[in-house]
Each structure stands twice: as C-alpha cells, then as structure tokens.
Image (cartoon, coloured by chain):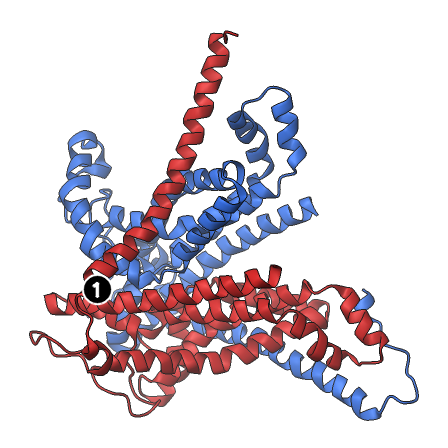
Amino acid sequence: MTMSPRTRWRYAVNNVMLTLTALCTISTISILFFILGYLVVNGISSFDLAFFTQLPKAPGESGGGMANAIIGSALMVGLASLIGIPVGFLGGIYLAEYDGGWFSNAVRYAADLLNGIPSIVLGIVAWNLLVVPMKSFSAWAGGVALSLILIPIIVRSTEQFLRAVPNSLREGALALGANKATTTLTVIVPAARRGILTGIILGVARIAGETAPLLFTSLNNQFWTTSLGQPTASLPVMIFTHAISPYDDWHRQAWAAGLVLLTIVLLANITARFVVSRNVG
Amino acid sequence: MATRAQPAPIPITKPSTQMGDATARLGTMFFAGGILIITLIIVGVLMEKSWLTFSKFGFGFLSGTNWDPNNEQFASLPFVYGTLLTSFLALLIAVPLGVGAAIFLAELAPANISSVLTFLVELLAAVPSVIYGLLAIFTLVPFMRDYVEPGLAATLGFLPFFQGQIFGVGYLTAAIILAVMTFPFIISISREALLDVPRDQREAALALGATKWESVWDVVLPNARLGIIGSIFLGLARALGETMAVTMVIGNDPSIKASLFAPGYTIAAVIANEFAEASGNMHLSALVALAFVLFLLTMVINGAARLMLARTARKNA
C-alpha cells in the first residue's frame, strides 16, 4: 500500500512531535541526575567526620565542619513541626469532618492563600512578630517562620485524605453507637493514617530545605547555639553564605552540605512515596 | 450528607460522651480558626509595616525607579520589572518543555514507566531552592558567560535584548534557573489534566483516522486546556516568589535594562540581601512594602490558577 504525500507528511509530523515530547521528558529528568551527580562528585571529597562534628572554620583555614548547622536545622525543623503538625492535623480534621459552611470555606481559602505566600514574605512577618519584640534573631523566630509554611501543607493533605475515607465507615461506626469524636479518632483517622503521614513527611522535608524565611529570623551563627533565643545556624543558610563567598574551602563545604541536605530531602520524599503506595496496594 | 446524621439518643449514652463530642468539635474548630487568624495577622503586619512607605512615596513607590537606601529614596519599579521579566522568560522556556513532557507521560509512555518518570519529576520539585542556586553559581553561570551569551550576541546581537556586556549573572541566567524550578509543577499538573480527558475522546479521534499526534493536538489538549493554563499560572506564582536561586544569580543591580545579559534584581532577591542589614525604619518599611507588592502579585496569580483548576474539576465531575 502506498501512502499519499499528504498522509506521509502527517505521519512524519506525528513521529517528529512524539519524539520531541520524549526529548522534553528526558531533558527535564536528566536535570535531577545532573544535580545529584554534580553534588556527589564534588561533595563526597569534602566529606569526613569533621563535617558532622566540628564548627565552621574561618575563611582561609581549611577543615572544619557544619555540626552546629545540622543541629540548628534539626532544632528549628523540630520546633516548626511541634507547632505546625498539631495545628495542621487538627485543623484538617475540622475541615473534613465538621463541615461548617462559610467558616470552613474561609479557613480553606486562608490555607490556600497561606500556601501561596512566598516564603520570604513569611520570613518578614516572623521577623516583625518575634525578632523585633525579642530584640534578637533566634531559633524561635526561625521555627515559627517555618511552621507558617508547614501548616497549610498539612491542613490540606489531612483534609484530602480524610475525605477519601468511604462514608460507609463513618456510618458503620455511628450505627454501632460511637459518637462523632470516637468515630473520627478510632475509625476515620486510622483509615487515613498513611496518607496523613505522607503529607506530614513531605511537609517536613519541604521546610528542611527552606532558606529564605531563615535569613532574617534565625540569621546564622558560626558557633554553637546554647539557647533558642540566640541566632542559630542552619544547613540551607550555611549553603547560601558559603556558596556566595569567594573562598574555595567554603565552596567545598557548601557542596558537602548541599549533598547532605539533598540526600535528606530526597530520602524523605522516597519514604513518603513508599508509605503511600503501600496504602494503595 | 449522611455523615452529619447523629445516632438517635439511646438511654445508655452517657452525658460525658456528648460532652466529648462537643469538646472535639470546638477543639478542632479552634485550630481551624487559628489558621484563619494567622493569615489575617500576616496581611495585617504587611499592611501596617509598609504604611510608612506608601504614605511617604504614594504611587511614586510603584512608578519610580530610584532605589537608594543611603539617601532614603525608595521605589519598586526595577524590582517589579526584574521579577516579571525573569518569570515570563522562565515560562517561555518551561511551558513548551513542561507541556511536551506532560504529553509524553500522559499519552505515550506505558503506565509503569510513566509513574516512575512522574515520581522523578516530583523529586525534582522537592529539590530545595538553595541547591539550585548552588549548582547554578558553579555550572550555569560560567556556561552562560562562556558559551550561551556570546553565542546569542553573535547570532541575535542585532536585537536590543542580546547586546551589552556579558557577566554570566543576570536576567537570562535567573530565568533559566526559574524555568527549571517551574516545570516540575507544570508537568505534574498538566499530566493530571491530560489524564482526566475521557478515553473515548482519544478513541473517537483515532477511529476517524487521526494520527496519535493529531488526536493529542486537536482533541486532548483543547479538552485539558484549563488544567494546563492553571498549571502554568501555578508555576508563574512560584517563579515570582522564588528567592534563593534567583538571589544567587541575578547580579543584584537595581536598574532597568533591555539587555537580558544585564545584571538585575527581583523583589524577593532584594529583600533577601538587604533586610537583615537594613538601616533605619524607612529602609525596613520600604522592603516590607516590596514584600506586600509581591504578596499581592502571587495572590492574584494563585487565585486565577485555583479558579481554573476548580473549573476543570467541576467540568469532569
């Protein structure tokens, strides 16, 4: 069978365009592998025990580590989680289980709005609310700024996964004589627990990499932090200050820190994926 | 909804369980209300702290071009220009790439390969901004300075956008980084919009003799256009507010230049660089006013995106 020129043209267009879409996919995904590869190659050589146990060295001196930034990040992410997870989780339960008309819609709109606010703007707000009255940059302010990012993520994911629980479960529990609170706590939340957990992991991984809201809330610190009221080092801010510095030693430290941060964030995302796919299967 | 139905009160129901019910409702409502209050406080703080700037400079803050903290002169146009320019350039790159990849993932790739690749795209979205910046400083900036920008100047140098001194840092480099950070969003949401198009639409087109590409281009894409446009708006909102990676490659120059090679500035970048060391209330207030402008910009774009995505959700319901 011979094809007319018109048909041949149409098939040629088909093949070219479909190949192009494959190239789009390959080129976008290869960026991920480029980032990983570059950080592994450059970061691994700066890795040693000192990176995890020592303080940063002054410019010009080689060696040193980012132990204080690792602790500082853990501290502030922990603080943000202590605020953000309960508020987000309980707020999400309200939105999913007690539909309150205009009030619920207002909360939903607020959560969406909060979710869309650039993180640097949230940093400014935390600065005004905490750094100004306390007259000091602090881990408190950093933790609160991060919690403002975490809350809307957890609210919406909790609501979404609770809503996915079939109504028959609610009706069954209520028919057995359980009240609404007992039903929610012992039937609905456990049924949605994997999804809710996924949302929490993804949210915490997201704030672990946030830099902008920490720049003028927790600032940075070359030394150990001894109280939550002091300026506190964090891995993302360390990466930023080291990357824009003119010192080669600092650049190497930045790559090592980047590798640590990226590994943590990607592992959290892979874990979350594993949790949710077991839920489906 | 059936869930609201309470069981009929039966004698063995103790009063304490009814109490527990009311407590649970009020308790969770308290936290839900907290979210509302937090959002109101954020808007309130931004308005209050930027008031000094808007009352002193008025409309001139939005239209002026002079940013000089030493002489307490503040105007936002160079930053708004840099923010919009880098974001729109980023979309020019990210939209064709992102939609193309979404078409491949939704229409061509076998389901199991597609789900693995989509997961990799989601991982790309999870990479922290500061890591994009870190890599850009050491790879993209020298690459732009030594190859791309001289190449563009040699071939398209007759256009005002591709003239002038080459630094490596500047609008174009920032736009490329923003494009990379935007397309994971465009890909994953566009892919979902494409997958939502009913299967029989494709089959009808193919049965009429359309090629695979024709069915995608003429039938599936128009059906999914609201979702795709929504994804582009979400990407735009993200690009507008993106801070760290841009701060590291934009060049930090508060002036308006036509050349894409020129160093510029964005709203988020100037806040990141100047806020911690701002001198005096006027400078601080001007930076908060910039943050307020950025807040309004992203709010409008996000609102538009949500509207479009909500309409597709309803259409397919």
Image x and y of residue A268, in percent: 43, 67
Q: Is residue A171 left or right of residue A266?
A: right
> Looking at the image, which residue is at 47% across and 74% down?
A148
> Looking at the image, which residue is at 81% across and 64% down?
B1
The C terminus of chain A, quarter of image: bottom right
> Looking at the image, which residue is at 34% across and 66% down?
A263
Q: Is residue A94 above or below residue A28?
A: below
Which element is circle 1 on? helix
Image hue for chain A: red
Question: Splitting the image into 4 quarters, where does residue B259 fall?
Answer: top left
Q: Is residue A216 left or right of residue B11?
A: left
Image hue for chain B: blue
Residue B254 visible in the shown view? no
Q: Looking at the image, which is closer to me, A52 or B91?
A: A52
Image x and y of residue B80, in percent: 34, 54
Residue B35 visible in the shown view? yes
- Residue holding disc 1: A43
Image x and y of residue A178, in percent: 80, 81
- Looking at the rendered structure, the kind of residue marked 1 is Gly
Q: Is residue B74 above or below residue A175?
A: above
Q: Is residue A155 above or below residue B237?
A: below
